[in-house]
Each structure stands twice: as C-alpha cells, then as structure tokens.
Amino acid sequence: MADVTCNGRSYRFPKRPTVVICLDGSEPGYIEAAIEAGVAPTFARFMREGLHTHADSVIPSFTNPNNLSIITGRPPAVHGIAGNFFYDPATHTEVMMNDPKFMRAPTILAAFHDAGGKVAMVTAKDKLRLLLSNKLNYATGRAIAFSSERADQATRAANGIDGVLELVGKPVPEVYSADLSEFVFAAGVKLAERFRPDLMYLSTTDYIQHKVGPGTAIANSFYGMIDGYLAALDRLGCTIVATADHGMNDKHTADGAPDVIYLQTLFDEWLGKDVARVILPITDPYVAHHGALGGFATVHVPDVAAVPGLLDRLWNIDGIEMACAKDIACQQFSLPPDRIGDIVVISERNKALGTSPERHDLSGLDEPLRSHGGLSEQRVPMIANRRVATPLPVPLRNFDVFEVALNRLE
Ligand SMILES: [Zn+2]
C-alpha cells in the first residue's frame, strides 16, 4: 500500500498492526515508579529494548487539544480545538467544542481508512469519541470506534461494531473509575485479536492521576494493569507506541486545600464587575475530579490597550508563570486566534487558576487537588516496543506519535 498523507504529513502504511496509545495524565515518573515496584515488567522491557524518551505536549496541556493534535498530527492552530469550550464575543455565548463541526482538520485514522486500511479507536469518555472518530465510514466494515463509557450502546451503524460488552467480557464501567481506562485496553486487545486493525488508537482517562501521584499503591496498581495489556498487544505482534496528552502536578497547599489564583475576582477588582470574562477551557461536564481548576486561562477584555500595565499586574502575582497577549500566545503555542481570549494566563507548577471562589464546586474533590494545563505539565513520556530506525523529529512533540509509530521504528 502507498504512503498515506494527512494534514501535510506523510505516513507509511504499516506492515503489522500499529497501536498508538494516549495514557491520559501520565506525568513522567508514574511508569518508572511502577517499574521500581516490580509491577510493570513490560514497560521496563519496552523502555530498555525499544524506545523511551520525552516529548512536549500542546499548550494548553489539556485532554482534548492534545488528543486532537495526536489524531491529526498537528497543533490546535490547524485542527481548531484549543480547549473544551471557547467564548464567542460576537454572540456572548460560551460554546462547547465537543462537536466535530468545530474540527478544522481530518484525522489520521480517517485518512488510513479512506486509503483502504482497517482502523479502530477506543476512548474512555464519550466526550472525545465523536471528535476522534470524525468522518469514519462504518459501512465499509473497516472502521470501529466507541467509548468505554457507552460501550453498551455501540451499534454497527454508529460505531462499526455491536455486542462490545460480550466481546470484552466486562460490564460498562463507572465514569469516575480506573475501570473506564482498563476497559479501553481490554477492548483494544480483543480488537487486535479479532479485527486485526492496521492502525488503532487507544485513549484512556486521567481519573487516577488526578487522585494520586507517582509511586502510590493506587498508581502502581493502575500502571501494573496497563502493563499486562501491553504484554498482550506485544504478543499479538503489534507495534506499540504510548505517549500522553499532558502531565499532572499537585496544586494544593501544605494543608491540602486547593492553591488557587481566582482571576475573575482580580479582574473585577481591577476593571469593574464582569468587564473582563475569564474562560477556563478545562471546564467540561465531568469536573468532579478537578473542580474545573487547571493551569491555563484565557481572558476576554474589551480593550487591553486601554488598561496600561494589565499584563504587568498579572506577572506580579505570586504563582503566575506567564501572562501574554493573544497574538504572542497564538504564535508561541500554535493556537487558533478566534478561539482564544485577549490574554492568556498560565500558572506555576503547584498553583491552579480559577474564576471566582463561588463558581467552583469543589465538593467532588475527595483528594487534594492535582491538575494540569500549563507549561509545567507539558513534558510527557514516549515509549515504544521497537527500536528507532530513523532519527526522531526534533523537537519531539506528543503529536508526532503516529509519525514515530509508522515511519521511524524498526
Ligand atoms: Zn487528559
């Protein structure tokens, strides 16, 4: 089969089933600690005999922008998804970006399918399924895509498969659970066995990483679970490359309270009530595990130039790592200007950004806050079960992962 081109990048058609994995929230250290604890021998073997390096994720270091960059091979300026939602100043509305109509680029999976390949995609949460499976034609019998969350509702017409629970041999998992991610892997192994996709994308959820840090018993057990499925995929002859959408850091004080800079409160003090509008693009329908508190915010201000020293005021706040105007942020992070506010604010490693205290429901936070979104969560692992044959892209981005899997390994 000829090479497949997608969004200006060229990919070789794989000789063996190729599995790209996004381990949501896999801050460097989780896998190393699980190996140290003796529960991740397959990861250890891949890292020793295959590839182990680090890559930079997309900023904002959130789930959707990074999953969309991975599946398109391009940054948000190209695919358009810069967060879970954006504010449209023309209509004064906050618009959810979980609908494929907001995507401005095709996916690598759809390109391989249209070139005659067999493709599969399994994601933990249903919010990502429609985006990641955009434009797959299930009528050909060469495409399968579903979420763990709604695995029981999969049909041949809408997902290319039915009877997923019977195939996987597991019930539908709880949405806030490690089982949601385990189901992704269990399904991936069954699909590798029975469907033999040329190209498969598996994307988990970061429920565990929001809860606990590297080296904890819960985290070690989670990565130990993943390790067993990696061994199964490896035995099935798959090429496997795993990376992550973003890292994860503690964002709480010594007594366990969330350590938050409330930006709407500050802007209300500086400019008057509700003159500025702070957008936290981490906000989505599933906020229990982070209370919508992350490390990245964008702020709509009617006229930034009319408020001299506004950026300086932000820079002077303890815990702000970066504050800049939209054009600088869009250039530096390859973001779509029409979906970013006038100012971008990023917090330091152990600080989170909020709007105002009364707007955050923290009742679902049963552990001290861990979250992501900023530069301090940009470094992620990249691990493969095969050696590098052709030098890797420099700098290496997590959205180079399909390029690495298809073009750069032995
Ligand atoms: Zn994530």
Image (tube, rainbow, N blue to C red):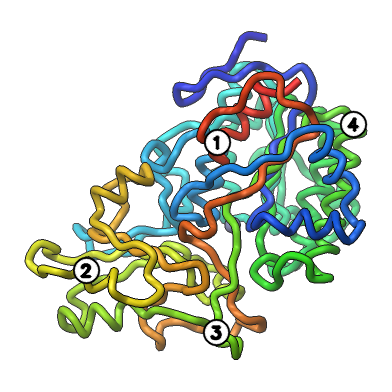
Category of crowding for the residue at label 4, using alpha-carbon neighbours closer than 10 angstroms: few (below 14), some (14–19), many (at least 20): some
| Disc marking residue 396 | 1
> Is disc 2 placed on a helix, strand or loop?
helix
- Mark linked to residue 312: 2
Please, what is the three-letter code of the amino acid marked with disc 2? Answer: Asp
| Mark nearer the N terminus (2 vs 1) | 2
Nearest the camera: 367 or 196?
367
Name the quarter where the C terminus is drawn.
Answer: top right
Q: Is residue 184 above or below residue 395?
A: below
Q: Position of residue 226 (x, y in %)?
A: 82, 52
Q: Position of residue 253 (x, y in %)?
A: 55, 84
Q: Quadrant of residue 254?
A: bottom right
Give the residue pinned by disc 3. 253
Q: Earlier in the sequence, mark 4 or mark 1?
A: 4
The answer to which of 185 and 381 lies nearer the viewer is: 381
Amino acid type at circle 3 is Thr
